[in-house]
Image: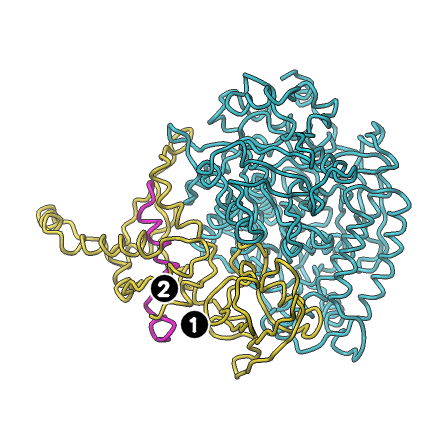
Amino acid sequence: MTDSPYEHHDYDVLIIGAGGAGLRAAIEAKQRGLKVGIITKSLLGKAHTVMAEGGMAAAMGNVYEEDNWMVHFRDTMRGGKYLNNNRMAELHAKESPDRVWELEQWGALFDRTKDGKILQRDFGGHRYARLAHVGDRTGLELIRTLQQKVVSMNTDVFMECKVLRLVHDDQGRIAGCVAYWRANGEFVTFGAKTVIIATGGVGKSWKFTSNSWEGTGDGHAMALWAGAKLIDMECIQFHPTGMVWPLSVRGLLVTESVRGDGGVLRNSEGKRFMFDYVPEMFRAETADTEEEGDKWYDDHAAGRRPPELLPRDEVARAINTEVKAGRGTPHGGVYLDIASRRTPEFIRRRLPSMYHQFMELAGVDITREAMEIGPTCHYIMGGVQVIADTAATAVPGLFAAGEAAGGMHGANRLGGNSLSDLVVFGRRAGMGAAAYIEAGDVSTSFNMDEVESAVREALAPFERTSGENPYDIQRDLQEMMQNLVGIIRNGPELDEAMSKLDVFTERVKNIAVKGGRAYNPGWNLTTDLPAMLTVSRSTALAASLRKESRGGHTREDYPNPDPDFAKFNFALTSEGGNWDSPISAAESPLLAMPDELKALLEEAH
Amino acid sequence: MADVTMRIWRGDASGGDFENYTISQNEGEVVLDVIHRIQATEAPDLACRWNCKAGKCGSCSAEINGKPRLMCMTRMDDLPEGPVTVTPMKTFPIIRDLVTDVSFNYAMAEKIPALMPPPMPEGGYRMFQQDVERGQEFRKCIECFMCQDVCHVIRDHEDNKQHYAGPRFFIRLAELEMHPLDTNDRREYIKEEMGLGYCNITKCCSEVCPEHIHITDNAIIPLKERLVDADYDPVAWLGRKIRRRTKRSATDAAVQPAP
């Protein structure tokens, strides 16, 4: 079928990304007897999933019997400010318990209740204690379990292999991709009947982020270039609690479990300020006083939840406001205090990674002192538009799951819903790909022109003897996005960002790379920048169009939600399919909600 | 703050040498911050592997002043005054500069006989915290492979890589053997194929573990005792004779399919 001049491999299902979603998709496709290949630009087991801390949300009802999928569905939709794909939220709430139990069959060891069931912890926006967890290293447990399962199934994994772009057949169906090996810089082509995008997030376009270097939005961008649509790209989650000091670790995540386990937020005056920031939507279920909130930790019937456990968008905005009002800490954050509220033994047992992280990197003993924290770019709710049941995109043969897919979380994601999202929709993407292959209408050719143009573009920076340093461009881009497309946005700044992004596009075309092709980080970064720019342009464009504030998108010139904007997502398409092609936006109406789901949202709980 | 001199090994499989970079420092920085600044300025092609920069992924292992460390968790102000030497892990083949080929570890992972749990009952398995805690300690492993790097069985004897799993996989095997749900028996396999006997418990692995896993005390020694019990316990020996049961062979254990 192909006459690729490069190393070439053929698969039924080719998965780009080896985090939770990619690995779970691989297991599903393997179990269905398909030939599966996984490509990752890092080593296996290092994906950003390892950094997830608090847990995975699943209404198993192990701690509160009252919990069930309907409450989880409602919490997810409310947290997402109703911009969610309701079918995704429904599937997620219904299927996540089975996905957690399945992990135990594959070797995961979750923390236990006294009677030997999987223990579940409290998190923001979840009505009941719902997060299955292992201390504060749940992501590591998830990825290691899936990794070991994938390895035991003899799956082909291409490590430190960077995909440049997707390849079509002559009918516009997906036919594979072109990539290069980081170790030696040689190109490699992959033919595939189906490709699953599971590339994770985009946070590396911002200066202060919890994301690893990999979060450059490769999958978002490649799907857009290939003809898929991106939705909700304006909805970016700034996690309320990232480290602020020392500067070298600014943005590093401090798990929400600190608050779930009793930690509170205070400003420089020592005040628990979150009581001043309870929005109307959550007032009925939030404590009025510190005493009431404190009772809730032990018994959810004895009081309402403390406002520190509001959804992340609310808490991040409140912290931002406190700091701007001059009530911040010396390094521009607020205090997160668990030392005065729990014993040192409790803190070390429940939050071992946090203890370790602050002790070693900041010299702060969190069992004795408060942490200084502030918002950090953490997660993108937006992503490739998919059909909920199959994870299929608008391009035949292309699927997307996990953070790279959009819709599940609406305008704001609840903590703990990401790990369960990965396994629920990773599995569904594997199923969707299998069904597509079974239907038989798969790619019949491999467009070598697309391969050659990607190769030419990748090698061009070696031919320039003078030009831009890719690291300078990356630093300037992160600075600009942080300042102009950050947690609080306004129209003129977004316009300014968009015109600056045009300048960045020209700068990227003038990069000169030093050294050879073998494991050259400067060159590797150069090949990440087109995706970073595509994502940045998508976010700036969608943010300028959504003239309201909703979830992870806050406009100071339109500070309130606008019901007219609650009816659709902005769906972006590429006009030309290249990384520098114009991006256009159209309103894509939300999926109509069945009456039985509507009834769940209206029920008083 | 005063400038610092970084002596960084640069080269590839064909050879290399140290290069010196004198560079500014900022408060609270770790070694990886300084390496990144060298990349962004003087040497954009300086190869180093990293991902999370938070001590959670285990990618940025290197030898700092001769000792295996995570570059992202080693603070510059904790190192002695004077030049800082950074070299790649010695036990693995060089790819470039600070990046090594760690595929030995991935090949070894493929040989580990998987967990074999019984079918799951309605409502999930029941396990108790004190029972899962033993395995949880080993599952903290971030696969930085520094225990493998420092283990003299393979650090100084390349041939041993054929038949020696190394500390990282001894804790994995211990975890499986201690797993409350496991029904597989890997004892013979651990002895014959994984080379547990080569370890002479010098505890170098435990000393370098960034997760402070008690590799020797809690995994290797109990595993060794378990194997010795299987071979020499007279009651077990008699039991085998009477019930005419033979232990499953190493190959049998290895090919047991995952559920």
Residue at image position (76%, 52%) is A535
Apparent colour of chain B: yellow
> What is the magenta range?
B154-181
| Separation (CA) of disc 2 from disc 1 | 14 Å
The percent position of residue A254, horizontal first and vertical second, equals 60, 44
Q: Nearer the viewer, residue B66 or B182?
A: B66
Inspect the magenta stretch and tell me whether residue A20 lies in it: no
The percent position of residue A259, horizontal first and vertical second, equals 58, 34
The percent position of residue A353, horizontal first and vertical second, equals 51, 46
Is A387 on the left-hand or right-hand side of A566?
Answer: left
Is A198 on the left-hand or right-hand side of A56?
Answer: right
**Circle 1 crowding by C-alpha within 10 Å: few under 14, some 14–19, many from 20:** many
Residue at image position (43%, 72%) is B91
Q: Are marks 2 and 1 in contact (CB under 8 Å)?
A: no
| Chain letter belonging to callout 1 | B
**Residue B204: mark:** 2
Residue highlighted by disc 1: B91
First in residue order: circle 2 vs circle 1: 1
Dominant secondary structure (helix, strand or loop) of the stretch shown in magenta: helix
Is A347 on the left-hand or right-hand side of B235?
Answer: right
Q: Which amino acid type is shown beneath numbered disc 2?
A: Cys
Apparent colour of chain A: cyan
The percent position of residue A581, horizontal first and vertical second, equals 84, 58
